[in-house]
Amino acid sequence: MIEIALHQLQFYAFHGCLPQERVVGGDYTVDVHLILPDATTAIEEDDLNGTVNYAGVYEVVREEMEKPSNLLEHVCGRINRRLLTTFPLISAVTLTLTKVNPPIGAACLGASVTITTKREEV
Protein backbone atom coordinates (compact mmCIF):
# COMPACT_ATOMS: atom_id res chain seq x y z
CA MET A 1 0.00 0.00 0.00
CA ILE A 2 1.13 3.54 -0.73
CA GLU A 3 -0.24 6.95 0.25
CA ILE A 4 0.18 9.91 -2.06
CA ALA A 5 -0.58 13.40 -0.73
CA LEU A 6 -0.91 16.87 -2.19
CA HIS A 7 -0.65 19.53 0.52
CA GLN A 8 -2.10 23.03 0.68
CA LEU A 9 -3.39 23.35 -2.88
CA GLN A 10 -4.56 26.97 -3.03
CA PHE A 11 -7.70 28.24 -4.72
CA TYR A 12 -9.89 31.31 -4.91
CA ALA A 13 -13.49 30.12 -5.09
CA PHE A 14 -17.11 31.08 -4.47
CA HIS A 15 -18.45 28.60 -1.91
CA GLY A 16 -20.72 29.45 1.00
CA CYS A 17 -24.30 30.00 2.11
CA LEU A 18 -24.01 33.77 2.45
CA PRO A 19 -24.76 35.84 -0.68
CA GLN A 20 -21.56 37.83 -0.06
CA GLU A 21 -19.46 34.65 -0.35
CA ARG A 22 -20.93 33.92 -3.78
CA VAL A 23 -20.16 37.46 -5.02
CA VAL A 24 -16.81 38.25 -3.37
CA GLY A 25 -15.38 34.73 -3.06
CA GLY A 26 -12.57 33.72 -0.79
CA ASP A 27 -9.37 31.77 -0.31
CA TYR A 28 -9.40 28.00 0.18
CA THR A 29 -6.82 25.29 0.67
CA VAL A 30 -7.16 21.61 -0.14
CA ASP A 31 -5.18 18.67 1.22
CA VAL A 32 -5.64 15.37 -0.62
CA HIS A 33 -4.48 11.95 0.57
CA LEU A 34 -4.84 9.04 -1.85
CA ILE A 35 -4.48 5.37 -0.94
CA LEU A 36 -3.30 2.95 -3.62
CA PRO A 37 -3.39 -0.71 -2.54
CA ASP A 38 -0.62 -1.74 -4.93
CA ALA A 39 2.09 0.51 -6.32
CA THR A 40 4.56 -2.26 -7.17
CA THR A 41 4.86 -1.15 -10.80
CA ALA A 42 5.69 2.41 -9.80
CA ILE A 43 8.11 1.35 -7.08
CA GLU A 44 9.97 -1.41 -8.89
CA GLU A 45 9.70 -0.38 -12.54
CA ASP A 46 9.69 3.43 -12.27
CA ASP A 47 6.52 3.46 -14.39
CA LEU A 48 3.89 6.21 -14.10
CA ASN A 49 1.19 3.73 -15.16
CA GLY A 50 1.56 2.06 -11.76
CA THR A 51 0.58 5.16 -9.81
CA VAL A 52 -1.49 8.35 -10.05
CA ASN A 53 -0.32 11.44 -11.90
CA TYR A 54 -0.25 14.37 -9.43
CA ALA A 55 -1.06 16.87 -12.19
CA GLY A 56 -4.19 14.91 -13.09
CA VAL A 57 -5.29 14.89 -9.46
CA TYR A 58 -4.78 18.66 -9.27
CA GLU A 59 -6.86 19.18 -12.43
CA VAL A 60 -9.80 17.24 -10.99
CA VAL A 61 -9.64 19.26 -7.75
CA ARG A 62 -9.33 22.55 -9.68
CA GLU A 63 -12.32 21.77 -11.91
CA GLU A 64 -14.52 20.88 -8.94
CA MET A 65 -13.41 23.92 -6.92
CA GLU A 66 -14.56 26.15 -9.79
CA LYS A 67 -18.19 25.02 -9.29
CA PRO A 68 -19.83 27.23 -6.61
CA SER A 69 -21.55 25.31 -3.79
CA ASN A 70 -23.27 26.20 -0.54
CA LEU A 71 -21.45 23.65 1.62
CA LEU A 72 -17.83 22.59 1.95
CA GLU A 73 -19.13 19.09 2.71
CA HIS A 74 -20.71 18.96 -0.74
CA VAL A 75 -17.52 20.12 -2.45
CA CYS A 76 -15.43 17.51 -0.57
CA GLY A 77 -17.81 14.70 -1.44
CA ARG A 78 -17.91 15.73 -5.09
CA ILE A 79 -14.11 15.87 -5.37
CA ASN A 80 -13.67 12.50 -3.64
CA ARG A 81 -16.19 10.77 -5.92
CA ARG A 82 -14.63 12.29 -9.02
CA LEU A 83 -11.10 11.23 -8.01
CA LEU A 84 -12.26 7.66 -7.38
CA THR A 85 -14.09 7.44 -10.71
CA THR A 86 -11.25 9.08 -12.67
CA PHE A 87 -8.34 7.09 -11.22
CA PRO A 88 -9.04 3.34 -10.93
CA LEU A 89 -5.86 2.66 -8.90
CA ILE A 90 -7.11 4.73 -5.94
CA SER A 91 -8.88 2.72 -3.22
CA ALA A 92 -9.62 5.62 -0.84
CA VAL A 93 -9.43 9.41 -0.71
CA THR A 94 -9.22 11.65 2.34
CA LEU A 95 -9.71 15.30 1.50
CA THR A 96 -9.61 18.35 3.76
CA LEU A 97 -11.09 21.57 2.41
CA THR A 98 -10.36 24.73 4.42
CA LYS A 99 -12.10 28.06 4.03
CA VAL A 100 -9.44 30.60 5.01
CA ASN A 101 -10.69 33.39 7.31
CA PRO A 102 -14.38 32.36 7.22
CA PRO A 103 -17.07 35.00 7.87
CA ILE A 104 -17.98 33.94 11.41
CA GLY A 105 -17.52 37.26 13.21
CA ALA A 106 -14.30 36.21 14.95
CA ALA A 107 -10.61 35.88 14.20
CA CYS A 108 -10.21 32.42 12.68
CA LEU A 109 -7.44 31.06 10.47
CA GLY A 110 -9.79 28.63 8.78
CA ALA A 111 -12.81 26.36 8.95
CA SER A 112 -12.24 22.85 7.59
CA VAL A 113 -14.20 19.81 6.53
CA THR A 114 -12.47 16.43 6.14
CA ILE A 115 -14.13 13.51 4.36
CA THR A 116 -12.78 10.03 3.65
CA THR A 117 -14.40 8.08 0.83
CA LYS A 118 -13.62 4.47 -0.10
CA ARG A 119 -14.02 3.08 -3.59
CA GLU A 120 -16.83 0.73 -2.52
CA GLU A 121 -18.84 3.77 -1.37
CA VAL A 122 -19.01 5.30 -4.85
Image: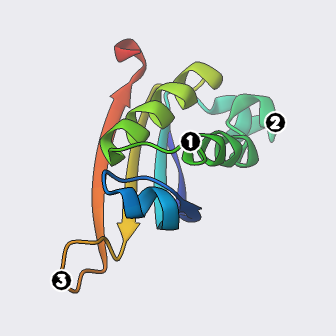
Q: Is residue 44 above or below residue 14?
A: above
Q: CA distance from mark 3 to mark 1?
A: 27 Å
Q: Is residue 92 above or below residue 56?
A: above
Q: Earlier in the sequence, mark 3 or mark 2?
A: 2
Please state, as top left, top right, bottom left or bottom right, where the C terminus lies in the image.
Answer: top left
> Who is closer to the viewer here, 108 or 46?
108
The label number, if any, that marks residue 106 in the structure image: 3
CA neighbours of label 2 inside 10 A, class few (<14), some (14 to 19), many (20+): few
> Who is closer to the viewer here, 113 or 2?
113
Residue drawn at (29%, 60%), measured in percent from left and top?
112
Residue drawn at (55%, 27%), measured in percent from left and top?
82
Check the image and name the residue furthest to the bottom.
107
Return the x and y of residue 117 as percentages of the image width and height: 35, 29
The label number, if any, that marks residue 67 in the structure image: 1
The label number, if any, that marks residue 92 in the structure image: none
Q: Amino acid at mark 1?
A: Lys
> Who is closer to the viewer here, 8 or 74?
74
Q: CA distance from mark 2 to mark 1?
A: 33 Å
Of badges 2 and 1, nearer the viewer stands: 1
Return the x and y of residue 44 as percentages of the image width and height: 73, 37
Return the x and y of residue 64 as percentages of the image width and height: 57, 40
Q: Secondary structure at mark 3?
A: loop
Q: Amino acid at mark 2?
A: Asp
Q: Which residue is mark 2?
A: 47
Instruction: Judge whether residue 54 can be spotted in this image.
Output: yes
In the image, is 109 to the left or to the right of 105? right
Return the x and y of residue 115 as percentages of the image width and height: 31, 41
Q: Is residue 91 above or below residue 24?
A: above
